[in-house]
Amino acid sequence: MRRLFWVAVGAAAGVYAVRKVQRTIHAYSPSGLAARAGGVGATVKAFADEVRDRAAEREAELRDALGLSERPMLTPGEAAELTDHPVRERRTSRRSKDLRSTG
């Protein structure tokens, strides 16, 4: 009876070891790595989307707090002009002229 017990324990340990090795081999195979990378990519994309959404919300809050919400956003051409020539006098709205004269 004792021998039968140890044979069963040995067989169970052997089955456990074989399954563990097979899982490890699959995890490092091309298909296993691709499956893990796909999960990471989705997580990174979800994080980036969340950051982008929160940044847009915060920008809207700041624009409201600074009184810039009624002012239209810059067009891509105006933004390029600003980055090319940041110190050049630009056309400003009446509101920003009033703010400069009081500040």
Image (cartoon, grey):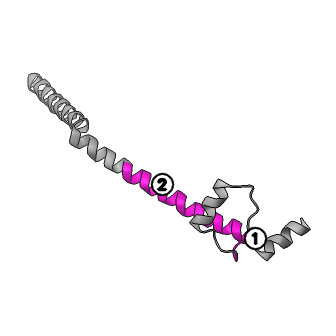
The disc placed on residue 53 is none
- Name the kind of residue labelled 1 in the image: Thr
Which of the pair 84/5 is nearer the observer?
84
Magenta residue span: 41-70
Residue denoted by label 2: 47
- x, y (%) of residue 95? 80, 75
Query: Dominant secondary structure of the magenta stretch?
Result: helix
Q: Is residue 56 magenta?
A: yes
Q: Is residue 21 left or right of residue 7?
A: right
Q: Residues within 10 Å of mark 1 (few under 14, many from 20)?
A: few
Which type of secondary structure does the marked residue at label 1 adopt? loop
- x, y (%) of residue 73? 63, 70
- x, y (%) of residue 20? 22, 33
Q: Is residue 7 left or right of residue 72?
A: left
Q: Residue at x 16, y 31 (%)?
A: 18
In what quadrant of the picture does the N terminus appear? Answer: top left
- Name the kind of residue labelled 2 in the image: Phe
Q: Is residue 22 magenta?
A: no
Residue denoted by label 1: 92
Q: Residue at x 70, y 65 (%)?
A: 62
Q: Residue at x 66, y 59 (%)?
A: 82
Which type of secondary structure does the marked residue at label 2 adopt? helix
Q: Residues within 10 Å of mark 2 (few under 14, many from 20)?
A: few
State the image quarter where residue 4 is shown: top left
State the image quarter where residue 103 is shown: bottom right
Spatial separation of the CA atoms under disc 2 and disc 1:
37 Å
Which of the pair 77/41 is nearer the observer?
77
Position of 12 relative to 53 (above/below): above
- x, y (%) of residue 66? 76, 68
